């Protein structure tokens, strides 16, 4: 997964259809799904792997996901978050964002 399905930001899951992975190295910028909750799951998985194997690469995955997708998806007021974390946004799509959620 980390070699073929992980964005440089730590986001995972490249397609919204089925909220799933697609083919290897299919990591589009504009249609990336990369849910915030998937990154939280990735952090939990990496933590368990770090505890079992003691390899620092798992800590790197946790750090990248935390700072770039989990915290990066939160609004400054702490009451809203982005469900998805796109790498590219078109200005016209900012008028209405169905992925902005409230707590």
Image (cartoon, rainbow, N blue to C red):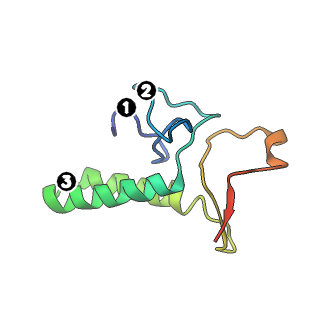
Residue where numbered disc 3 is placed: 55
Q: Residue at x 67, y 62 (%)?
A: 101
Q: Residue 5 at x, y = what percent?
A: 40, 35
63 displayed left or right of 36: left
In the picture shown, does residue 19 fall above or below 76? above
Residue contact at pointers 3 and 2, CB within 8 angstroms: no
- Label 1, secondary structure: give it: loop
Q: Earlier in the sequence, mark 3 or mark 2?
A: 2
Residue where numbered disc 1 is placed: 4
Q: Earlier in the sequence, mark 1 or mark 3?
A: 1
In the rendered image, the quadrant that contains the N terminus is top left
Query: In front of the other: label 3 or label 2?
Result: 2
Residue contact at pointers 1 and 2, CB within 8 angstroms: yes
* Residue 25 disc label: 2
Where residue 41 sits, quadrant-wise, is bottom left
Neighbor class of circle 2 (other Cα within 10 Å; few <14, some 14-19, many 20+) is: some
């Amino acid at each position: 997964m980390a070699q073929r399905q992980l964005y440089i930001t730590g986001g995972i899951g490249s397609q919204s259809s089925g909220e799933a992975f697609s083919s290897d190295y299919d990591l589009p910028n504009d249609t990336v799904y990369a849910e915030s909750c998937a990154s939280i799951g990735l952090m939990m998985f990496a933590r368990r792997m770090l505890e079992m194997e003691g390899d620092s690469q798992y800590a790197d995955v946790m750090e990248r996901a935390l700072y770039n997708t989990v915290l990066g998806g939160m609004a400054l007021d702490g009451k809203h978050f982005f469900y998805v974390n796109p790498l590219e946004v078109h200005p016209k799509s900012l008028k209405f964002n169905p992925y902005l959620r409230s707590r």
